[in-house]
Amino acid sequence: MRGLITLLLALFLVSCNSSDDKHVFEAVSSNGVLKLTFNVTKEGAPFYVVTRENTVVIDTSFLGFEFKDAPAFHKNFSVKNSETKTNVETWSMPWGEQKDVVNNYRELKVMLQEKVSPERFLNIIFRVYDDGIGFRYEFPEQARLKDVEITEERTQFNLTQDYNTFWTPGDWDIYEHLYSTTKLSEVNALKYVGHVNLAQTYIPENAVNTPVTMVGENGIHLSFHEATLVDYSGMTLKVDTTNLSLESHLVGSENTTYKVKRSLPFHTPWRTVQITDNAPDLIASNLIVNLNEPNKLGDVSWFKPMKYTGVWWEMHLGKSSWDYGMEMVDGKWTDTGKAHGRHGATTENVKRFIDFSAKNNIKGVLVEGWNTGWERWIGFEDREGVFDFVTTYPDYDIDEVVRYGKEKGVDIIMHHESSAATETYTKQQDTAFALMQSYGIHSVKTGYVGKILPKGEYHHGQYMVNHYNNTVEKAAKYKVAINAHEPIKATGLRRTYPNTISREGLRGQEFNAWAQDGGNPPEHLPIVAFTRMLAGPIDFTPGIFNIKFNEYKTENQVNTTLAQQLALYVVIYSPIQMAADLVEHYEANPEPLQFIKDVGVDWEDTKVLNGEVGDYVTIARKERETGNWFLGSITDENARELDIDFDFLEDNQEYTATIYKDGKDAHWDKNPLAIDIETLVIRKSSQLKLRLAQGGGVAISIIKK
């Protein structure tokens, strides 16, 4: 962290002895565009309003809680005191989309007290940025309240128009739904109950998961999410389609009569609304990560952003298997105790990936299916004790694999599929992370496929939020970085715990290989860039060259062009990026492979050049240390022409631009492999027209001469 300047420009205390006091409490963004006002009604109900350029964006919206065995927090409050301050700060990311992050905001803190017995206290803290707001509740230490069991949080967002909304259902168990695009008044999450492609799913009401992004008629863009989700339940937003309102509804548990249990003092996660007048500024916003606390781990240079290959995609294609000896016997999958010859995580196969990676500037190899237990977890309700995170299959020599990788300059990435058996994984974490530490392995991909054990818990409730976060903290003690799949949502905690490197939390690439609904449509990723990616890094696993994998699955394919698969290395951000296809498919296509060899993964600066939610987006990123730039542009099912200025480049500097673009007749379905490659010399004054095919893209490496 550097350049921290905190300016306390104004600090005042206002005594308000009754809710009839006419004082208005407000905070205004540094550019004067956004204003948040707060007050209480005559009945003592707290509410807020947000305006942008004097136009109401969020109308009178009430705040409060319901508790088990205690009166609700929703009225009878008076404002006892308030504080305001201005923060001006710049901090540095150890890795990220950019190096230096500006964190400027105006803060309003209001201290409430009940006017009736038991006269409890509640504080609400608002922060107003140029591109949005965040607020959270603070339960201060107090004599009349020691513990709370929250049955519901009642945070409202009352909107002023029927926004075009990009949403996934408020599923308590999974984020792997396709996005829907409807008017807010037409949101119907319940139609996705029981989705056939999902390992687990539970949608109890007409609610949406966050981030949920909206576009208004006047060009205003909103995205609702949360930041700093710690020891609390994940938030869904219940949709009132008649009154055009959202209200927080927390993920619960079948094992408790409350949704959150906490001892005072504590504060909730931040409730966030990014507010911009265009789509690119949503991606450029750092509001989510800024609302988190600074780095608590100190030096994390032991983690290196990297590209990686691995034993993964071949299992989704059916070329190989995760298990060592599973056979179909009398119509049932049975562990025969003998090798069936299809096991992917063999010493020989992993060495093949290491050799390929070493030749192509790829520093990691992920190995899935290396450890015992894969024979016994699918279809078994009681999965506790199934997986062993230190014992290898007979055909995988971890000592030799790690030794060989070090010889070649390639790191092994561990894989821990917990099968959502949380007690087993928790008990084994110290041993498993210690094993990784002994080998000098610094990254692990974790998985939580299946219904959570213990029974009755959901992936996104307080129990699992704590499990995910505790795993990150424990891993840090062993210098291990976590890439979580089937995770809790990203809420910016990568700032506080930078070993939180990436996560899934969306419908990923693998759905193209086995989903029964045709895979991810061309519009999927142009939506993801403006929704899920606003929350944080995504391990999407791009780079599939064999778009139509008919030798393995004739009914499935990737629904993009080859050029778009290259562009995704720039567009969909992660400090770890997988070259996900099979070695033989890369070796057969050395020219497009060159972009994967060249492209960076750790950035000094990011420029979002254009974009519309669900349609297209173009992003340029500057690599740390080299000063080279890389550009990615993707589109939905519609072909496009986009004009690009290179005014983000350095003055008086020439660059060699290698352009990987859709061929003349390229099409995501009819001709996905058509790609043209050309080289130009460009400079800051250069301009270029990008032509993107249907479902296509453009990738450009911009290397200093």
Image (spheres, rainbow, N blue to C red):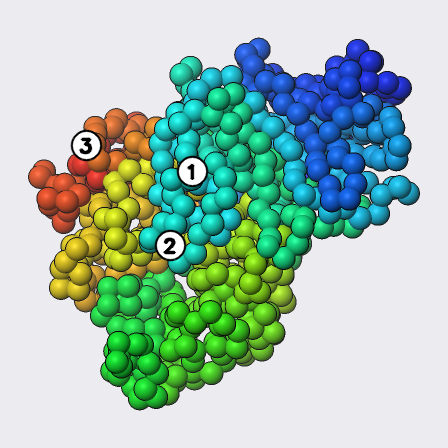
Marking on residue 328: none
Amino acid type, residue under disc 1 in the picture: Ala
Q: Quadrant of the C terminus?
A: top left
Apparent side of residue 470 relative to residue 312 in the rendered image (left or right): right
x and y percent of residue 281 in the render? 45, 29
Q: For numbered disc 3, what is the local secondary structure?
A: loop
Identify the residue position indicated by label 1 in the image. 189
Corner quadrant of residue 66: top right
653 and 399: which is toward the camera: 399
Q: Earlier in the sequence, mark 3 or mark 2?
A: 2
Q: Earlier in the sequence, mark 1 or mark 3?
A: 1
Does the CB distance between marks 1 and 2 fall below 8 Å?
no
Marking on residue 639: 3
Amino acid type, residue under disc 2 in the picture: Leu
x and y percent of residue 647 in the render? 35, 29
Residue in the picture at 47% in, 45% down: 203
Q: How many marks?
A: 3
x and y percent of residue 409 in the render? 39, 71
Up-down relation of residue 128 to residue 168 (above or below): above
Up-down relation of residue 310 to residue 221 (above or below): below
